[in-house]
Image: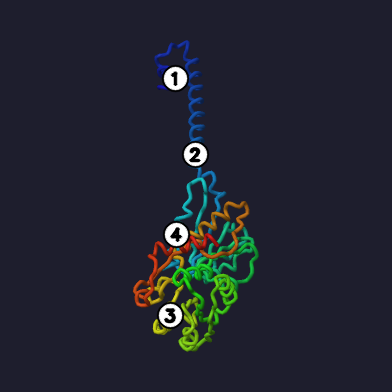
Amino acid sequence: MMLSGGRDEPINLRQAPQRSRVRVIARNRQVLMRTCRQLCIGLLFGLLHTQPGLAAETHADTVWLLSSHTNGDYQKVADAFIQRLAPPPEQQLTIRVINAETETDALTFKPGTTPPSLIVAIGSDAARLAEAAPRTVPVLDILIPRLLYEQLPPAGSARSALYIDQPFQRQLNLCRLIVPDLRHLAVLYGPTSQGSDQALRSAAQQSGVTLITQHVTAGTNPNDALDQVLDDSQLLLALPDPDVFTRYTVAGLLLTAYHHAVPVIGFSAAYVKAGALAAVYSTPEQIGRDAAEMVLAARADAGWVLPAPRYPAFFSIAVNRQVGRSLSLKLPDDTELQQALEDKEQAQ
């Protein structure tokens, strides 16, 4: 039988003299106990210092990412959001993705269930589903129009939003960069967008621009209203409205504006491809990253207090150069236009 002596060579009980066997056995027992203590301490030290996530897992902050859909722009927003928040181990931030289409009962909390630290709802369907969350859980609605967000039931300071819309002042700044002497701007309001009239008029007044407007009622041809505003206008600002600019009407509206030699400022890259002159918009990736910044700001506060609802901080510009040439417009290149718009916004 061989045991470690701890300091010198192993001690062999068979080779030890008869008179010292008792002392050898006692010494070996002490060595064995000391070795076991060292192993236990080393194992505990290793668990605590090489796997910090195990010790803190139960204290991790949890964000539920509630998505209206799991494809297209919704998925791009979610991917950018998760990528920006991918935490180092010490942050202990857990993100759970929930499909609002199939997990409609996800926000039904049973007694004893621990709610998340924050719910982020992507899109209008998810925003409505998030109404079922406890009022103590803050909710951040993203990829949602401002007017729709304002129609949601009030939830106090526990709810905020990152709008999908662009601020009117940013859009008017783009209009000014394209037509420096802009004085008259045409706008068509529908049942949805008419709620923006006051805010748009206030921004236009600050920019020294007069609005020429017409209202389109549901079920009518918006081209009839468009003819009444184009003759005295230098630009047409398109506003998102399901009763005005739709996939069924956009071609006719753009063609009518083109025949009047009035450029159209759209609200997405798709409209620029369809024939609008330009647009300022935020990509899904920019929305996702921007939303993550709001979450980081809220998490920095001990009580997960969300910032106030706001428009996107990150944006892009699209320009249809062919339309510009057809209308004999001299436009800066995209990089110059983007930089000029950013500089103008920072100066205001």
Q: Are marks 3 and 4 in contact (CB under 8 Å)?
A: no
Tag 2 residue: 47
Which element is circle 4 on? Answer: helix
Vertical side of 211 occupied by 135: above or below: above
Specify which label sits upstream in the sequence, 4 or 2: 2
Which element is circle 2 on? Answer: helix
Give the left or right position of residue 85, taking residue 198 as reference.
left
Q: Nearer the viewer, mark 1 or mark 3?
A: 3
Tag 4 residue: 80
Specify which label sits upstream in the sequence, 1 or 3: 1
Specify which label sits upstream in the sequence, 4 or 1: 1
Q: Position of residue 279 (x, y in %)?
A: 44, 71
Label 1: how many residues lie within 10 Å, few (<14), some (14-19) or many (20+)? Answer: some
Q: Quadrant of the C terminus?
A: bottom right
Q: CA distance from mark 1 to mark 3?
A: 96 Å
Q: CA distance from mark 2 to mark 1?
A: 28 Å
Q: Amino acid at mark 1?
A: Gly
Specify which label sits upstream in the sequence, 3 or 2: 2
Q: Amino acid at mark 2?
A: Leu
Give the left or right position of residue 271, taking residue 163 as reference.
left
Kindly tell me whether residue 103 is visible in this rendering: no
Vertical side of 265 occupied by 231: above or below: below
Q: Position of residue 25 (x, y in %)?
A: 48, 19
Q: Name the residue rendered at 55%, 82% in the picture.
A: 191
Q: CA distance from mark 4 to mark 1?
A: 60 Å
| Disc number for residue 262 | 3
Tag 1 residue: 5
Q: Nearer the viewer, mark 3 or mark 2?
A: 3
Q: Name the residue rendered at 48%, 82% in the picture.
A: 244
